[in-house]
Image: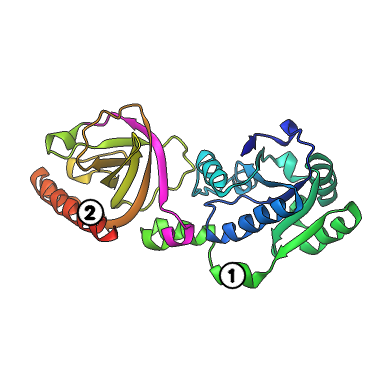
Amino acid sequence: MVTVQSLSKYDEQHPTAITIGTFDGVHIGHRKILERLIKNAATLNLKSTVLTFFPHPRMVLQKDAEIKLLNTIEEKTKILEELGLDQLIIHPFTKEFSRLTATEFVRDILVNDLKTKKIIIGYDHRFGRNRNANITDLKAFGSTLDFEVEEIPAQEIEEVSVSSTKIRKALEDGDIKTANSYLGYEYMLTGTVKRGKGLGRTIQFPTANLQIDETYKLVPKKGSYVVKSIIGGKTVYGMMNIGYNPTVSGKEKSTEIHFFDFNQDLYEQQIQIRVLHRIRDEHKFDSVEALKRQLKKDQKTSLDFIYNSQ
């Protein structure tokens, strides 16, 4: 897959089949559109192309909207590549870009720049300044500017009954099972392992302290989770705590992972965690010894879950 960081850097002349959107999460509803796009492009000898935007339009247009996203831009890129897409264009979303009229967007960008011959889009897609143009307008443009519009009807998308908003809500509630079923994959957290306070090591539960640099990335509800990661080509399981470590009067929120049967030095390495199952809420225990006893129970719960899932 070719990834282009701005429309101004795009210079491919081969005609395209395209879809447009933020595709946050690249969930099972999105995949209906993307799979159709890829299949159509192959049949018509077009390049399957996604035009997406970063930052998320709501981050730019609604300053008070502290939207949290399901994917970092790197995570989204990797998922789209694995689906078999030919091209991904990530265009910087700005207020100036948002003021393009529907005509300017379709004529100048879709037709002149991207050489679009087919657009596959959801029934409720809106575009142009103030999002005032819809699928009917897009079809009208297609008839005069020589491209075809294929509409994904409401019943097809709603049959899946999935939205990025529902997935965000599930993660904020700690409902990992629902979130993962809607995503079609295990929710991921990507970050760099940093040195923590070292408490875990003193109670025989050493942890990797995961620093996620992208402040917009949604971190699930505080609590303990069963997780896995691929490290050095091997799948490693563990348990993760998200929270403030109240038993030891922690002040800063952290994401810490204790891997089972693993003792490699991970400091300053980037790792990706897949969240499999929620164990419990975060609690303040009466003592470090009580915390240690609970961690042993959590480990048994985690290993039982892993064993029963395989």
Q: Position of residue 38 (x, y in %)?
A: 65, 52
The answer to whether residue 86 is seen in the rendering is yes
Q: Amino acid at mark 2?
A: Ser
Q: Secondary structure at mark 1?
A: helix
Q: Residue at x 22, y 31 (%)?
A: 197
Q: Which mark is residue 21?
A: none
Q: Position of residue 199 (x, y in %)?
A: 17, 35
Observer-nearest residue: 233 or 283? 233
Observer-nearest residue: 167 or 156? 156
Q: Which residues are magenta?
A: 179-197
Read off the residue under disc 2. Answer: 302
Q: Residue at x 54, y 68 (%)?
A: 160
The answer to whether residue 134 is seen in the rendering is no
Q: Residue lying furthest right in this view?
A: 144
Judge the density around disc 1: few (<14), some (14-19), many (≥20) Cα neighbours within 10 Å: few
Q: Position of residue 248 (x, y in %)?
A: 18, 40
Q: Residue at x 13, y 50 (%)?
A: 296
Is 189 within the magenta? yes
Q: Secondary structure at mark 2?
A: helix
Q: Amino acid at mark 1?
A: Glu
| Among numbered discs 1 and 2, the one appearing first in the sequence | 1
> Measured along the vertical axis of the image, is residue 63 above or below residue 5?
below
Judge the density around disc 2: few (<14), some (14-19), many (≥20) Cα neighbours within 10 Å: many
Q: Residue lying furthest left in this view?
A: 289
Q: Is residue 307 left or right of residue 273?
A: left
Is 73 within the magenta? no
Q: Where the C terminus falls, by quadrant?
A: bottom left
Q: Residue at x 77, y 57 (%)?
A: 132
Q: Tell how many labels.
A: 2
Read off the residue under disc 1. Answer: 158
